[in-house]
Amino acid sequence: MAMKSTVAFLLLLCSFCVLCAGCQPQTRAYQVSVRNDTAGPVTIWLLKEGGPYEDGWKSPEDLAIESPKANIPIGGMIVRPGKIADAGPVTGHFDPDANAVLRVYRGAHSFNELLAISSGSPDRISAKLRPGDNEFLITQQNFRISLEPVDQIPATRP
């Protein structure tokens, strides 16, 4: 009887260890390139949806909650029309269900203006990133910005 309970305990312990190992944050790296094919500037921002919470991956909303009265510099990058911007490689620690996200805002904005552009606005769009290289064209269609993943950013406008 003692042998059966010992074997059962060891199986339970091994199962627990396997489950816990799958829950540990993973280190991931992202390289992002975007080409702005709109008529005006856009602001791009890399952020993380999910944990663990860490510097370099905070959304504008996270920064505002963290330091509501501070004069916070823009953590994003402004990309002028027809220009290409590159970010990375940017690394971070990600829970298995967490995602890296590219957020794009139409226009060159102050921090407070970014906070006022909510999800669902025609002036804001997001895309989940995959580890490694990510390339996008930013266009405007029917008064909305669009974010199109591409295999390679063309050197000239399509």
Image (cartoon, grey):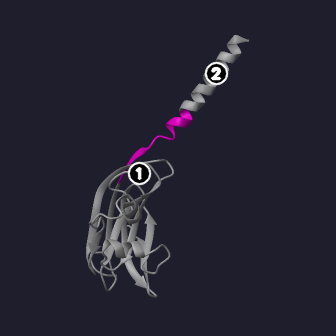
Q: Position of residue 21 (x, y in %)?
A: 50, 36
Which residue in the structure is indicated by mark 2?
9
Q: Is residue 146 magenta?
A: no
Dividing the picture into quadrants, the one containing residue 113 is bottom left
Q: Quadrant of residue 64?
A: bottom left
**Residues in magenta?**
18-29
| Residue 121, horizontal then vertical, whole percent | 47, 78
Which image quarter is the N terminus in? top right
Dot 1 falls on a residue whose secondary structure is loop
For the question of whether residue 61 can be seen, the reply is yes
Q: Seen in the image, is 85 located left or right of residue 93?
A: left
Furthest-right residue in view?
1
Q: Which residue ends up furthest to the front in the rendered image?
A: 69
Q: Residues within 10 Å of mark 1 (few under 14, many from 20)?
A: some
Instruction: Using residue 42 as the reference point, say whether residue 119 is left or right of it.
Output: right
- Estimate the spatial distance between the alpha carbons at disc 2 and disc 1, rounded to whole Å: 35 Å
Report the residue marked by disc 1: 53
Q: Nearer the viewer, residue 104 or 66?
A: 66
Q: Is residue 24 magenta?
A: yes
Residue at the limit of the structure toward the bottom, as seen here = 142
Q: Is residue 25 above or below residue 2?
A: below
Considering only vertical position in the picture, is 45 above or below 27?
A: below
From the image, which quarter does the C terminus lie in? Answer: bottom left
Towards the viewer: 42 or 109: 109
Identity, as a three-letter code, of the amino acid under mark 2: Phe
Given residues 39 and 67, the one toward you in this image is 67
Label 2 SS: helix
